[in-house]
Amino acid sequence: MPDGHPRPGPPAGDGVPPGPGPWPGGMPGADPAYGPHGSYEQHGSYGQYGQYGQYAWNEQPEPQQYHQSHLPHQHQHPESVGEFHHAQQAEWSGRPPQAQQGHEFQQPYPVQQGFLPLQAYEFEQPHQVHGAAIPEPRGPVAHGGETIAAGPESPRERKADTGTGRGRRAARLAREGAAEADTTARQSPAAGRRATRSAGEAEAAPPAQRGRRAATAGPGTADGPARASAPSEQRGGRRAARRAGAAEATPPEQQGRRAARLARGATPQAHGRAARQARGATPQAHGRAARLARGATPQAQRWAGLVKAVALCAAIAATGMLVLRGNEALAGLAAAHPPAAAPPQATGAVPDPGRIVQIIAHPDDDLYFMNPDLRYSISAGHPVASVYLTAGEADGINATPAKGAATTPDKPAYAEARQNGIRAAYAKMATGDRTSAWQRTVVPTKGGGHAEVDVLVAKPQVNLVWLQLREAGHGYADVPDSLHGLWNGKVARLESMLSSGTPVKQRFAYSKDQVVQTLVGVLEQYTPTTVRFQDPTPGRYPDNKQYTDHQDHFYGARFVQMATAAYAKDVKDRPHFAVQNYVGYFNGSLPSALDPQEAKEKLDSLDTYAWLDRQNHCGSTAGCGDLKVSAQPSGNRWTDTVNYARGTGTDWLTSDKDHGLWAFKVLDGRLAVWHRPGPVGSWRGPDLLPGTGMDPGAGAVTLKDGRIAVFGTRTSFGARPTDYRREVVYTVQKQPGADGFGEWQSLGTPETADETWTSDISAPAVSVDGTGQLAAYVRDGAYGLRGRVQQPDGGWGPWEKLGGEDLHGAPVTATDGAGRRMVLSATSKTVVGWAQPKPGAPLGRVTATGLPDTALPLTAAGREGGVRLWFRKPGSGNVRTALLTADDGLKVNNMTDLGGLNGFGSVTASGHVLAGRTAGGQLGAEVGPGRPWGRSPLMFVGAPSSTTTGRNMVSLAVVGLDARLYVTSSADAPDAYLAPWQPVGPRNAAP
């Protein structure tokens, strides 16, 4: 990113707008002779698996699941947000690479010709979660319709106990046995009834019968494997006897007093858990308790009997609660004042982390413009591959500006130093050690050249791919030998620029199509579910018409756009994928989005990259980082913020008159539709509508006749480079409640020439006023507001200039209680607005609201007779809200700070539910005014969305990093709770 040249535009404030196990076939590792960055070798042959090998993440039987140790604390208070049960995590299939002779990657399955090889690891065996984090269940555990295999019984539980110890063991196993069917009981009330009957039968059965049942327990029961080995049973019996002797010394009175203290200290939540566990207890669990209790002392037998009696009573009460809660759920849609919901059970499927590929122009663009998302993904253990289009050689001077004149330029060495800095920054984010070893390898690309691929040995899910093309070396000047020149046809081929330490030794050059095919090959091998890249339409400064971002950034992003379109069209055996775009240099002119701690963490990564201490930790003569940025690693305040360029709207989830739900997001460059008919129907989707080229983000609005219209933007490339075009499009439901949608219709764009403003328009904001009139608004390339209004005959008026200046992000719109439309937009210093004097009338003039500066983006909804606005406080991440009214001109009432767990990005609000991204990247939610925010384990793409269903229910949804829809709901009441999150459809695999 830094290129030694001044950045266009002034800064803000100037008024300018893995676990153990063998690797299949083995894998080469780091050679100490090459220092901490590991070994490399240029492949002259490709071994028994042919020329192309494979990528690190290809052919995954099951995606990795969240490991609980990677998730921040889930609740700020005990009853805030429903959570996932954390099942066992899919584990990397082997140990970190070991040093071997040579570098042939062994491949356990056939590959397709033309694939770019990148062997680092595969998903194969389920991950064994540490027992301290997650208790091991003793049977299959159902989660939200998905069954996750349970772990084996622990060795300690296979030991035989005698005397008082056996009695206490019996009591504990009775409680644990009840826990193993907790989820089953929630799935089926019949399980609770069977458990109750089994508890009664176990209590009533004579000891001899209970003994015979224990003797017949086979391998399929919970006790079968534990009784299979006599020697181990004897050893366990001796150890248990010693423990029992110690226990005999404790007087029964003390044991009773301890039990009484525990009972008195039990919280209501604990009593609730006991009830839920008891109603789900399996007959095997009760049988096991009975068998262990046979040899217990009288005191222990009485203790075990007491536990059983309490469990039986709790089961009866809990069964009644199941019936009551079921009736409440159905009645809540119509009840004027629904009863307070009980704390939710933490059920639901464990979210799939997905696979992330991020493609950037220069080394450090990811650290400046994609963090903290990058750090969140690495810290959570997600598979992440960062692909660098250019070598980032700039002017070849690896020195601070003060020493630049005295430093001899060396472009290959400077490119190597920047690569070393990136490796150090990623290693520190992933392992805490910047010197953690990397495996550096040469691979052929689908475009006919070669790439360097680096695999972090300690965390092989972290990969770096270096394509090493020439960079422009200037932010906006005309440089033919660049991605810009290649895109526009000023050069037929772009040459490589190999770093001094790369294992790639053969130079190459790519045509425009070969760059696209190289990127398709990368996507084909990593099969991402989320693709991150930079903003392809950043705009220009109004005064000097210079690009607001580096030309390599946005022309590189256009190559990625073209590659993702080709990948979606031509590659069929792949998962769905979502896209996230990021603002670049212009972040420095916007209010800060990150709280101080998040900004510090981001700056720490840049400090590592900038090689501040000058210690030669990498063993390279080129240097271990980018000294050009070491004088100011924060750049132009870039470490204080992050902004998404697209996909920030929160109106993509909506309901219909039959209380059904509709969700609309862009997957694979097409509009994906999910639908739940009625209040209790089964979800369907994702169904991808015809039509390609859709940009991230879609917004839904309900028309006067009850049909749903969905708006977004679409990018087309055309036959000539100047034909690049971004336009507003929409589709309308054929009938209210029907699954069919009509063909896409275009509203065009106010930016008719790409060269003028780089096709820079925002996503459309759409609303229907009290007369049923539909209107769409966008921010144009000159940072003003444009709008089109639908006419009574169904046609549309022209794009009208509505004023405003220094507008940023996307505008928002909503209607007040009188049916008047209001439009609001953020500037770099405040918020401005427009309002209709009456429904059906044109918008009034732009009006200052007097609100302070806000971090992007905004959210608006009709509330309390006016329009309520939500936004983030700069430098804090806290959510703020204000009510705007238009009775006597646009006025702001009562701005309030609502907290928000120090996050950034869009906030969605419906009823009593308020939700948005928190620090750490998960979804946080407030489910009532003044109640603490809670945090779920979900990490997601873009913005959350919510909607009211009927009069008294709220639904909330996100699309996870696995490109899968997740939904929850809550009664719209101040003391309600969110239900457990549930995924929609199967795990994301081939479409």
Image: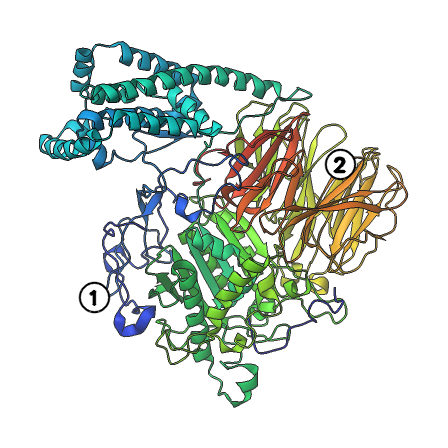
Question: In front: 560, or 203?
Answer: 203
Does any portion of residue 190 appear in the rendered image? Answer: no
The first of marks 2 and 1 along the sequence is 1
Question: In front: 166, or 15?
Answer: 166
Q: Quadrant of residue 970?
A: top right
Image quarter in which the N terminus is found: bottom right
Q: Which mark is residue 325?
A: none
How dense is the environment of label 1, judged by Cα within 10 Å: few (below 14), some, or many (20 and up)?
few
Q: Quadrant of residue 645?
A: bottom right
Q: Is residue 446 above or below residue 983?
A: below
Look at mark 2 in the image and give the residue it sits on: 863
Look at mark 1 in the image and give the residue it sits on: 101
Three-letter residue code for mark 2: Arg
* Position in image of residue 258 (x %, y %): 34, 29
Does any portion of residue 880 appear in the rendered image? Answer: yes
The residue positioned 22% from the left and 21% from the top of the image is 293
Q: Is residue 854 above or below residue 957?
A: below
* Position in image of residue 58 (x %, y %): 36, 50
Secondary structure at badge 1 equals loop
